[in-house]
Image (cartoon, helix red, strand yellow):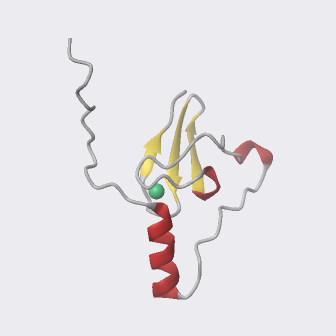
């Protein structure tokens, strides 16, 4: 059994949200702001980060399709991903 092998990542391109935010600021002259929550139920667990650019939960939208299969969208890199505990 090989345990040393790294898991295969589908998206080979890894982004950095700090760089993306800086890039956006440079291009548009304004920063990407954290997502505004309309109500408490839209609050995202701070443990969740974008799977692509590692943006914190403040920059993630909750795509409330199915209750037990939450899908998130990153405001910074627009990546869609699922998060399971
Ligand atoms: Zn992202």
Q: Quadrant of residue 6?
A: top left
Left or right relative to 25: residue 43: right
Q: Determine whether 54 is above or below 7 in the image.
A: below
Residue at 58 percent of width and 72 percent of height: 32
Residue at 25 percent of width and 24 percent of height: 4
Q: How many marks?
A: 0
Q: Determine whether 11 is above or below 23 in the image.
A: above
Farthest residue to the front: give it. 4
**8 vs 4, nearest the viewer:** 4
Left or right relative to 60: residue 7: left
**50 vs 67, nearest the viewer:** 50
Where does the image place residue 25, in percent across and percent down from the top left? 52, 81
Quadrant of the frame with the N terminus = top left
Where does the image place residue 84, in percent across and percent down from the top left? 51, 30
Residue at 33 percent of width and 54 percent of height: 14
Where does the image place residue 60, in percent across and percent down from the top left? 57, 54
Farthest residue to the right: give it. 40
Q: Quadrant of residue 37?
A: bottom right
Where does the image place residue 70, in percent across and percent down from the top left? 55, 37
Residue at 45 percent of width and 77 percent of height: 23
Quadrant of the frame with the C terminus = top right
Q: Determine whether 34 is above or below 6 in the image.
A: below
């Amino acid at each position: 059994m090989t345990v040393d092998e790294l898991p295969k990542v589908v998206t080979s391109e890894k982004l950095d949200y700090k760089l993306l935010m800086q890039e956006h600021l440079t291009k548009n002259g304004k920063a990407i702001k954290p997502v505004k929550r309309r109500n408490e139920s839209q609050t995202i667990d701070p443990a969740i980060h974008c799977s692509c650019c590692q943006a914190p939960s403040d920059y993630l939208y909750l795509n409330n399709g199915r209750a037990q299969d939450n899908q998130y969208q990153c405001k910074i890199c627009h990546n869609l991903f699922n998060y399971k505990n």
